[in-house]
Image (cartoon, rainbow, N blue to C red):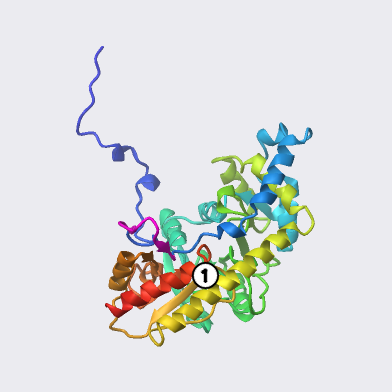
Amino acid sequence: MTSTIDSGFQTSELLSTLGARESALGGFGPATTGLAADAIRLLGGVPANEALPVAQLGRAFAETLSDPAESAVALQYSVVHGIEPLRAWVAEHEGTAADRVLITNGALHGLSLLFGALLDPGDIVAVESPTFPLALRLIGHYGARVVPVPVSAEGLDLDSLEQRLRDGLRLKLLYLIPDFQNPTGTTLSAADRARAVGLAEQYGFVVVSDNPYRDLRFAGTAVDDLSVDSDAVVRVNTFSKTLGPGLRLGWIVAPSRLVPALTRLRSNTDQHSSLLTQTAVARLLHTPGTFDGILSTARELYRERAAALTSELRDSLPGAVEFDDPEGGIFLWAAATDPAVDLAAVKTRANELGTDFALGRYFDPDGAVRYTDRFRLGFSNNTPEDLRSAVRRVAAAFATE
């Protein structure tokens, strides 16, 4: 029997509604092409190689695989919610109970599980404006709509959000990056955190603290994270910025009422995070002083690099850009002071000169309409010397605009 294939057949015809859905939200803009191999990328998001605990993780993995009681077990299947030693460490780190912790494959995976558990098409999610583009893409993936809430140096505009809630807006989620927000680098005040939680309790929505930069404070005073004493709060976090994104390891802290749904969704996808990785990382974390030492190294490194970036910006672009000095995290959010400057053209010229940065417009929840005068510079994974060279190239690009 001979079979034939219709040449007009399109694979897209087989896609489900979810598989075929394309969100207009999210993304960092068109990929830069044609950069020289030695170009300096100030795109951020990446921890410094020098800050990653290569030696400590090497020992932890080697000890795990050489331990007769752990080696074969660590290569087996595991439990959906994560191993107890790792959940216990996370619980202590977060100030909560271990039975509220679910280990994930990083923060974006945690957000995907949470959004999958809570969002239906048409639901409304309030987000900071500007915000992390991949979170916007994920919200759109689940068919939800976003409502922007402006964020500035003065904080989150909760007055406008509360007024909209009084007028009948019904949220399912409020998505926040409380510490060293991406992209602005701002930190949400204690008062705004408490008020956001109060609004969530009053109006019946969930407030999400996505807080991957929290442990990277190198100046200023720390602010307590959103309180998990409230059943309206979910925290999502990751080891990607501290131990390394290649581990693909993070966590969710959720109210007890949400844990069964999150666990069920997890069991229907990948079952669990790598048991070998969980076991080795738990071994490292339970070694006294190790994680604190890793953080101390990273904070000092990023403090030095942020200082190099800001000092060169002031020297090379005096009066041309405005910014606040970072107190932590890995980004700087800057604005061109001259409204006539075309930052897209500056970026193109900077690319030709051998450097790259992220345009602010792509962090706009409304779709690249606002923040055309803004740009984000990542300082974490470049040396002070490279940061100074990159800024001088950006300055040259400004001069030819």
In-front residue for pair 307/228: 307
Q: Image quadrant of residue 392?
A: bottom left
Mark 1 surroundings within 10 Å by alpha-carbon count, few (fewer than 14), some (14 through 19), many (20 or more): many
Q: Quadrant of the N terminus?
A: top left
Magenta includes 38?
yes
Question: Can you say whether 192 is above or below 28 in the image?
Answer: below
Q: Is residue 53 left or right of residue 120?
A: right
Q: Is residue 216 visible?
A: no
* Furthest-top residue in this view: 1
Provide residue 18's location: percent of width, then percent of height.
40, 47
Q: Is residue 175 left or right of residue 55?
A: left
Magenta includes 282?
no
Return the residue at label 1: 384
Report the residue at 34% width, 53% height from top. 22
In-front residue for pair 135/230: 135
The secondary structure that dominates the magenta segment is loop
Q: Which residues are magenta?
A: 31-42
Question: Can you say whether 294 is above or below 361 in the image?
Answer: above
In-front residue for pair 265/84: 84
Which secondary structure, mark 1? Answer: helix
Report the residue at 55% width, 40% height from top. 268
In-front residue for pair 385/145: 385
Provide residue 202's location: percent of width, then percent of height.
60, 73
Label 1 is placed on what type of residue?
Pro
Report the residue at 65% width, 54% height from top. 53
Q: Image quadrant of residue 342?
A: bottom left
Provide residue 390's location: percent of width, then percent of height.
42, 70
